[in-house]
Amino acid sequence: MPGLDINALRLRNQHLAKPMFIEAADVVRYLGAMQSQNYGGAVWAVGQRLKGGTATQIDKALARGDIIRTHVLRPTWHFVAPEDVRWMLDLTAGRIRMHTAIRQRVMELDDTIFGKCTDIITRLLEGGKQADRVTIARAFQKGGIATNEQRFVHIMMELELQQLVCSGGREGKQLTYALLDERVPKTKPIGKDEALAKLAERYFTSHGPATLHDFAWWSGLTIADAKSGLEMVSNGLEMVKSGANVYWMRGESDRIFKTGSVYLLPNYDEYIVSYKDRSSSIEAKHLDKADPRGTLFNNTVIVNGRIAGIWRRELNKGAVTVHVTPFKPLSKIALSALNTQVKRYARFLGLKEHQLQISPA
């Protein structure tokens, strides 16, 4: 379709352009899963898709178990809705283990070690208790389990994949673990085909327009499984061709893009990370400025759907300063919208004062 504005539709369908949800769990449920290894950034990613959301509100949702943080889809943390945790893990845990198997062998982690860890952590957490990583690591060490280097990370990831543990609430600034069975009631398993279809429908509805390869990347599935899932729900989707690519999305959408729309996206935001092909979101000449690694995993400033700079925050007592490094001078309209976003970010954090500082382009 000529004139297809991929970025405008993604901003709309991801509820960045027009937030409609008021509860964090509804955002996470709608998107299917939200990458969340940087907790503070992930909380802001949820908050931008809420009407008037705050960081405290999302912390409370995590504490109540309205949203769960665990390893799912790819070998990294995601926020997921509690009713989605088990069937998603059933579908993707095997694929995640393929990525971690070599490292586990190098670190001499095997079923015997995981069995001992299961006993230790079950005794530590049962009865609704929660514990941070330092407390759990000490318990492992007391039980004769070494937790040096990356061993602890891989042990806990495996216990998450086994559906033994997941996130608890926060204790101060520390994230905790809890037993999954005590946070999320067991549900009836669903078949692989149903899970594939469910995941595909969720992804293309919330992330479209997107390609089959985008879906395979985001889900961690094989191309064959991703294609199978897409085919099962394709009748309810709209297929759009643009250039050499074939995109899928949920039905007809408003294709009007609002000039001057600006967003302060955190690192690993779904708007960037959930697509294998990220070329539509940035001009090639700006790639090194956005992220020398080429992964686009820094905090980004979005202007009219494209990455126009990067940003970082500086927190002081009762205030936040947002430092922006644009790739080229920003227009007056963009600067005004950026000021509005910084004010919104301060309000989200519960801070009264805010300041925007622009570095020379």
Image (cartoon, rainbow, N blue to C red):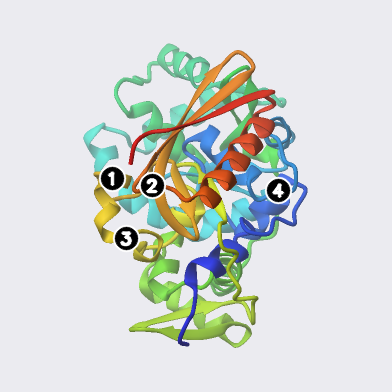
Q: Residue at label 2? A: 329
Kind of residue at disc 1: Lys
Front residue of 84/285: it is 285
Q: Residue at x 28, y 45 (%)?
A: 289
Vertical side of 172 occupied by 69: above or below: below
> Foreground residue, 340 or 18?
340
Distance (Cα) linking label 4 and label 3 = 29 Å
Seen at 50% across and 31% down, the residue is: 118
- Spatial distance from mark 2 to mark 4, Cα to Cα? 30 Å
Within the image, what quadrant is residue 150 found in? top left
For marks 3 and 2, give the one nearer the viewer: 2
- Tags 1 and 2 in contact by the CB under 8 Å rule? no
The answer to whether any part of residue 170 appears in the image is yes
Q: Which mark is residue 289?
A: 1
Question: Given the image, on which type of amino acid does mark 2 rest?
Answer: Pro
Per the image, label 1 sits on a secondary structure element best described as helix
Q: Secondary structure at mark 3?
A: loop
Give the mark nearest the N terminus, 3 or 1: 3
Q: Earlier in the sequence, mark 1 or mark 2?
A: 1
Label 4 secondary element: loop
- In the image, taking residue 51 as reference, residue 43 lies left or right, namely left
- Give the mark nearest the N terminus, 3 or 2: 3
Which element type, helix, strand or loop, lies under badge 2? loop
Which residue is disc 3 drawn over? Answer: 283
* Image location of residue 208, percent across then percent down: 53, 70
Per the image, the residue denoted by label 4 is 50
Q: Given the image, on which type of amino acid does mark 4 rest? A: Leu
- Work out how far the residue at label 1 is from the one at label 2, CA to CA, in angstroms: 14 Å
Measured as percent of width and height from the top left, residue 268 is found at 45, 46
206 vs 165, nearest the viewer:
206
Name the residue located 47 percent from the left edge and 82 percent from the top edge. 3
Q: Quadrant of the C terminus?
A: top left
